[in-house]
């Protein structure tokens, strides 16, 4: 029974490593020449990253590097290495402790491919926005190259790409379930989430003489075991959430070599340590020691073949995400066990302050000279005030990475960062571009009762309604805005991070403050859809809440004497979305005179609940069985294109397809030139000239550099053959020649929300 929050040692309470005598580096070194200038003969830790090195707290490699530096370790950076051979991974020599590998602030596959699996033309995290500077599945490739460079040096993987692939996960790009990235990468340990606690604990342990094999119980880590640990109680995941009758003969949660069931051959289990197994469904009130309990998930072999079991597994993973009551998870991959320790204990406010108060240079490494790095330009004057998100939107991976518990900084620390920006950012004009994070107005919002929060397993604190135990008082945020505006030399403070308007309407004073002083004419918000059926699969509030917020927004804008507008974001082709839903949304958009320019098609990112819906056709927001609710998901390219076209009903290029769809639906009444009609009739095409558009590289079939890109109909067998070929050639799993890369719609959000740890 959980009675209170779990705690952890302050991350700054460790005794510094002996190398602290070298002091603070102006920039973490990226070459042997820089190491020599610092007087270093070697690095203790080398971080390999797919991003350009920007020494700023919105870039994961800088945060991890500076955090370890504060512990006394010498940290080097290998940024955007040439992955085609191990040579570039030797540029700083052999690290004394380990390599730390991250794909960067974005998942390398989302960075390179659009939701329609077309190759992007740029990469916001690369000088000049140039694409092709990182491989597909960068964590796997970088990790294998580190092993080739120094085979006996441990490799630690982390960041958003590794974090969301810690267990078997559906891979949109190959249309198959892939193994845990820890297996494919050959790394020694995986750190998930915001990993300051874990990386500090593991690094000190290795520095004190422990091997990676000795580090088995650190929160926020995933490791590979040969067998489950002794002295634990094992709970089959179906005892937590029964998915229905699966297999009459053999347990579906064990690896069965080909032919075992048919021949009746007995497996040798002499190496399995004694454990207590719960043989029946858990009874209400049954008490088990969470510290000595783990949940067995269906094996990789099972979830890769059974989409219903995959949805069930996804549901269990999300139910075990509260760091105060989560139990360890185990999943068999062949003859090995993937062991996921419970999530890390969230940082307290003084610890958050300490992380952001470290001596960041706040600019790109000088070696880039005057090269423009688009992602840095976006965030160089923005400030991350919090972490985490309790919204639980099923299409978003922030919760899976950062957790549901909000971690907030103090006003003093944030105001000190404003002063730091004034001193360090070249050409600062007095405009703070954002005070935010994953969600701008969850700052200091948490559960009213520690005991309730410690025992809660809800997937969202705000859906279907706002939890009665959630604090909705925005006064700490309102007060922060007022303080920030009064800092000498600051003439404007904008709020650019995503806004939860369902929370904002609970505090009209906050909305007044926001609208009066911090909106520059347009405020972006994300209703995502208008139809209740689709919204229920997103875990988003209905349009009634949007209407309440809009009334407040318009009222306070008028009182301030300002003409301002809301810009809503919507998603097409989300699981649960039908053509009729999109038609109704398009009618709503036209009625409200919205003509969206940039629109988003649902992108199945690893580990999200909506991705489980996409792959399985089941709804993991409720108990999953073979007979439970089926969820329709638009997968066909034509259907996805039509749904996206409904969002851009005003674009003449979409009119022919929309007319065809509307007639098929029996809604030809929406075709015509009347005020209540959606698209004009064919006669309008003759009166609306179309400009010829030049095809961009990679956007049309046949572009030479995209011949290796995934397609919507890509055969999984071809993907497996490609991996085998790469392995034979020594190129590493998933190591295909890189094409053009770039960022997705998430570029419009604060990079702090996508920080890779």
Image: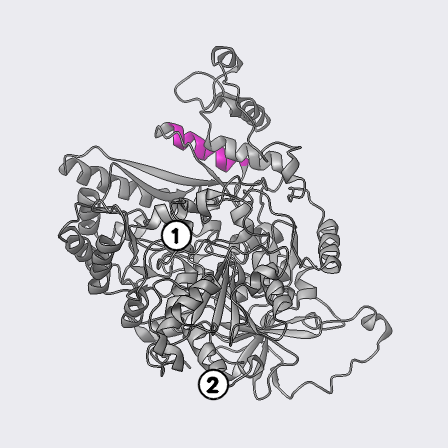
Other-residue count near label 1 (Cα within 10 Å), few / some / many at <14 / 14–19 / ≥20: many
Q: For the C terminus, give its image quadrant.
A: bottom left
Q: Report which residue position mark 1 lands on.
A: 751
The furthest residue to the right: 263
- For the point 74% across and 70% down, which residue is it? 248
- What percent of the width, then of the height, locates residue 513? 18, 48
Asked if residue 537 can be seen in this view, the reply is yes
Mark 2: few/some/many CA within 10 Å (<14, 14-19, 20+): few
Query: Label 2's element?
Result: loop
Label 1 vs 2, first from the N-terminus: 2
Q: Nearer the viewer, mark 1 or mark 2?
A: 2
Q: Main secondary structure of the magenta part?
A: helix
Residue 254 falls in image quadrant: bottom right
The residues tagged by marks 1 and 2 sit, at their Cα atoms, a distance apart of 35 Å
Tell me the residue at 44%/31% (across/down). Answer: 586
Q: Is residue 584 magenta?
A: yes
Q: Label 1, secondary structure: give it.
A: helix
Q: Which residues are magenta?
A: 579-590
Q: Looking at the image, is 737 positioned above or below residue 46?
A: above
Res 623 visible: no
Q: Nearer the viewer, residue 349 or 126?
A: 126
Give the color scheme: rainbow, by chain, secondary structure or one colour.
Answer: one colour
The one of 309 and 474 positioned closer to us in this rendering = 474
Q: Position of residue 424 (x, y in %)?
A: 26, 55
- The residue at the point 56 percent across, 34 percent down is 641
Q: Is residue 342 left or right of residue 312?
A: left
| Residue 402 at x, y percent in the picture | 42, 63
Mark linked to residue 208: 2
């Amino acid at each position: 029974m959980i009675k209170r929050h779990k705690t952890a040692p302050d991350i700054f309470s460790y005794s510094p490593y002996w190398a602290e005598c070298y002091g603070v580096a102006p920039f973490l070194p990226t070459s042997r020449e820089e190491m020599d200038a610092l007087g270093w003969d070697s690095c203790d830790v080398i971080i390999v990253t797919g991003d350009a090195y920007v020494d700023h707290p919105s870039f994961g490699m800088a945060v991890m590097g500076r955090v370890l530096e504060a512990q006394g370790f010498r940290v080097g950076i290998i940024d955007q290495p040439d992955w085609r051979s191990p040579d570039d991974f030797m540029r700083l020599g052999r690290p004394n402790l380990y390599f730390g590998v991250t794909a960067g602030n974005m998942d390398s596959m989302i960075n390179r491919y659009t939701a329609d699996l077309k190759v992007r033309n740029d990469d916001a995290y690369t000088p000049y926005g140039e694409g092709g500077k990182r491989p597909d599945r960068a964590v796997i490739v970088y990790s294998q190259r580190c092993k080739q460079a120094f085979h006996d040096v441990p490799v630690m993987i982390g960041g958003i790409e590794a974090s969301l692939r810690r267990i078997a996960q559906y891979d949109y790009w190959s249309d198959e379930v892939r193994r845990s990235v820890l297996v494919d990468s050959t790394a020694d340990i995986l750190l998930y989430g915001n990993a300051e606690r874990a990386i500090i604990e593991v690094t000190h342990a290795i520095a004190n003489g422990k091997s990676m094999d000795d580090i088995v119980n650190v929160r926020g880590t995933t490791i590979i075991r040969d067998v489950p640990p002794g002295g634990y109680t094992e709970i089959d995941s179906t005892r937590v959430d029964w998915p229905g009758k699966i297999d009459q003969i053999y347990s579906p949660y064990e690896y069965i070599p080909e032919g075992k069931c048919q021949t009746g051959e007995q497996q040798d289990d002499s190496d399995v340590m004694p454990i207590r197994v719960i043989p029946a469904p858990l009874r209400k009130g049954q008490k088990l020691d969470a510290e000595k309990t783990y949940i067995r998930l269906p094996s990789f072999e099972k979830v890769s073949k059974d989409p219903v079991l995959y949805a069930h597994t996804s549901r269990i993973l999300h139910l075990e995400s509260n760091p105060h009551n989560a139990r360890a998870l185990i999943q068999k991959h062949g003859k090995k066990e993937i062991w996921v320790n419970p999530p890390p204990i969230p940082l307290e406010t003084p610890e958050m302050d300490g992380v952001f108060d470290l001596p960041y240079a706040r600019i790109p490494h000088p070696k880039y000279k005057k090269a423009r790095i688009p992602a840095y330009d976006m965030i160089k004057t923005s400030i991350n005030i919090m972490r985490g998100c309790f919204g639980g939107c099923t299409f978003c991976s922030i919760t899976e990475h950062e957790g549901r518990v909000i971690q907030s900084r103090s006003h003093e620390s944030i105001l000190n960062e404003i002063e730091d920006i004034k001193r360090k950012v070249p050409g600062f004009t007095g405009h703070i571009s954002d005070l935010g994070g994953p969600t701008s107005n969850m700052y200091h919002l948490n559960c009213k009762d520690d005991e309730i929060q410690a025992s809660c397993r809800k997937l969202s604190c705000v859906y279907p309604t706002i939890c009665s135990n959630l604090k909705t008082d925005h006064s700490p945020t309102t007060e922060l805005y007022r303080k920030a505006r009064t800092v000498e030399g600051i003439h404007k403070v904008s709020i650019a991070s995503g806004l939860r308007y369902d929370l904002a309407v609970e505090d009209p004073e906050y909305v007044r403050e926001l609208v009066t002083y911090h909106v520059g004419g347009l405020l972006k918000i994300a209703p995502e859809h208008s139809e209740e059926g689709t919204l229920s699969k997103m875990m988003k509030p209905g349009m009634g809440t949007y209407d309440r917020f809009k009334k407040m927004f318009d009222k306070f804008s008028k009182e301030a004497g300002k003409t301002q507008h809301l810009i809503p974001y919507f998603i097409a082709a989300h699981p649960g979305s039908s053509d009729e839903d999109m038609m109704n949304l398009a009618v709503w958009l036209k009625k409200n005179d919205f003509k969206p320019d940039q629109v988003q098609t649902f992108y199945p990112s690893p580990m999200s609940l909506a991705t489980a819906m996409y792959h399985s056709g089941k709804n993991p927001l409720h108990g999953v069985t073979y007979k439970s609710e089926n969820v329709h998901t638009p997968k066909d390219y034509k259907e996805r294109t039509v749904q996206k076209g409904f969002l851009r009903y005003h674009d003449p290029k979409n009119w022919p397809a929309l007319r065809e769809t509307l007639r098929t639906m029996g809604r030809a009444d929406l075709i015509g030139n009347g005020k209540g009609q959606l698209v004009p009739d064919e006669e309008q095409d003759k009166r609306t000239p179309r400009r010829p558009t030049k095809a961009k590289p990679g956007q049309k079939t046949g572009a030479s550099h995209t011949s290796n890109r995934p397609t919507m109909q890509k055969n999984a067998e071809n993907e497996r053959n490609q991996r085998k070929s790469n392995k034979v050639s020594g190129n590493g799993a998933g190591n295909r020649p890189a094409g053009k890369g770039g960022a997705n719609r998430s570029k419009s959000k604060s990079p702090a929300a996508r920080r890779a740890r």
